[in-house]
Image (spheres, coloured by chain):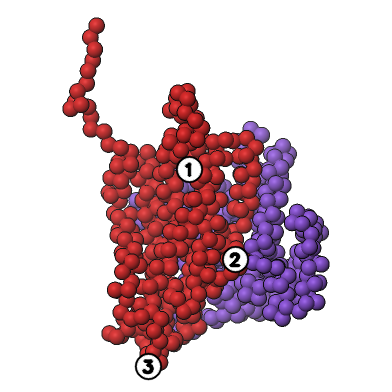
Chain colours: A red, B purple
Amino acid sequence: MTTATVSPASMPHEISPGRRALARLARRRGAMIALGVVAFFILLALLAPGIAPYDPLATSWTAVRKAPSAAHWFGSDEIGRDVLSRVVWGTRASLLAGVVSVSISLAFGVPVGLLAGYVGGWLDALISRMTDAMLACPFLILAIALAAFLGPSLTNAMIAIGVSATPIFIRLTRAQVLQVKVEDYIEAARAVGNSPLRIALRHILPNIVPPLIVQATLAIAAAVIAEAALSFLGLGQQPPAPSWGSMLNTAKNYIDNAPWMAVWPGLAIFLLVLSFNLLGDGLRDAFDPRQR
Amino acid sequence: MLNYLLQRLATIVPTLFFVSILIFGLQQLLPGDPAMILAGEERDPTVIAHLHQKLHLDEPLPVRYLYWAGGVLKGDLGESVRIQKPVLELIVEKLPVTLELALLAILIALAIGITAGVVSAVARDTAWDYAANIFALWGLSTPNFWLGIMLILLFSVTLGWLPASGYVSPFEDLKANLAAMIMPAFVLGNAIAAVLMRHTRSAMLQVLSSDYVRTARAKGLDERVVVLKHALRNALTPVITLGALEFGTLLSGAVLTEQVFTIPGFGKLIVDAVFNRDYAVVQGVVLCTATAYITLNLLADLAYFLVNPRLRDSA
């Protein structure tokens, strides 16, 4: 009897699916530019104290509604604050809202979706009906209602956005779990005596991460817009702290004589949201097995 | 068909029950005594006592829910603390304005979204396709309140063509009404057009590669007839039903659009209620929106079921 042996050198070089996906992502020019823009905004938020030319809260009665100039690149607002400095500092509120609210959605949505999909039965039916109920309330209207009852502040806005976006993650996780739990390797894990908790956390969860990453990226885009919308309505970041949404709220009153007050914060929201959307689309394609 | 309808209705009842719990639960988020907050800044002890009695605040939570849900089932959504009117009456009063805005927005979205989707699919991987995809990304990424402000800057402040804000009833002056509504309707329709474009593109790509389209082409039919009569007709079914699900986006967008253009509709009602701490109105608006969404979802499902022979026959 002969035994076939394969030397490690003769084995094809194994690349993990994650690395393959990253390589595919790197080939997408749009997604890579978007990643660059997101990185730029992250740096802007982190280095705001060093980058912003002025104190974002400092008023100047000699610089009220001044058009863009060498002194104020983006112009100044109705009480003489530098618009560029406020846009730079506003990045913090927007990114924080995007990341924190999506983290809240993931922290609640993934375990609940995992439970519903894995356990099934009446628990799944109960969770699914509750999810349907939350999804029946339009995202922003639910966020406005929650923020209204919790009270206006950036923290409460982030909680409201996070809670409102949670059902999407519950539904996505549940659907993915239902697909994965019938795979042979899960059956094998069960056959060798793994506990249900271990199967869920060690075998199912790692296999449903890619669609969650894609959804989280797109959800950050939606959360950035939602935070700006809540701040625009006066339910998010409270004045005088800078936020793109609240800057637009003030700007709309001065649109006829100081349009620059509205242009820059809006452009910043647009760029950041566009980048997260492009990145999400790129990640979706990169993780898609049909694209191999 | 009847079985399908009954099945769908059976899932709606528990969903509506949870919606009611969610909306009733909002009131529990208020810190402290809800009556103190609902009574407004005056905090008149007589009003507080009246609210305690009216909202059954001394009763246990499940009992309070039953009183509240019982009222809702009879059409009693509570009373606005500020305007001193029943919430349902306020909603019915404001609804036509938002419905007009929504209808115009949908028309704009259908016209732009479907045209862009068809062009993009027919001219796949050409400059048209890229332009349509860029348009979709632009529509999905532009905050509609910012787009509204920019349009006011261009068409009202700079060119002076359209009014920046306000609302005129179409029964009073149709021309003035359309002039006031065209910008907000475009702002609202823009994001939905982007979604419809993506749906139309993917549905058209699928249909264009199907056998019957190939047969139609092989018969020597004019390409325009193949695309518009054979392909688009079949591709539109999922697009219309999926489009109905954009109702939520439409209402969320209306809240901000009505705020930017000072339109006295449903969206402005909820924002004003939030600032007046008129919580019964906030709850009423959310409840009506959710119920309308669930109903529309059901109708979209039924429409899809009715126009799809394969689904209909398998039922």
Report the Cα–Cα distance between label 2 and label 1.
48 Å
Query: In this figure, which residue is indicated by the disc labeled 3?
Result: A62
Sooner in the amino-acid sequence: mark 2 or mark 3: 3
Three-letter amino acid code at disc 1? Answer: Val
CA neighbours of label 3 inside 10 A, class few (<14), some (14 to 19), many (20+): few
Three-letter amino acid code at disc 3? Answer: Thr
State the image coordinates of residue A246 (x, y, percent, origin top left): 48, 75
Please tell me if label 3 and label 1 are on a single chain. Answer: no
All told, the count of numbered labels is: 3
In the image, is B245 to the left or to the right of B94? left
The mark lying in front, picked from 2 and 3, is 2
Which structural element holds mark 3?
A: loop
Q: Does the image show residue B69?
A: no
Residue under the point 64% across and 79% down: B168
Chain where mark 1 sits: B
Three-letter amino acid code at disc 2? Answer: Leu
Please tell me if label 2 and label 1 are on a single chain. Answer: no
The circle drawn on residue A18 is: none
Check the picture and name the quadrant holding the C terminus of chain A: top left
Residue under the point 37% across and 49% down: A283
> Which is nearer the eye, A261 or A99?
A99
Chain where mark 3 sits: A
Query: In this figure, which residue is indicated by the disc labeled 1?
Result: B207
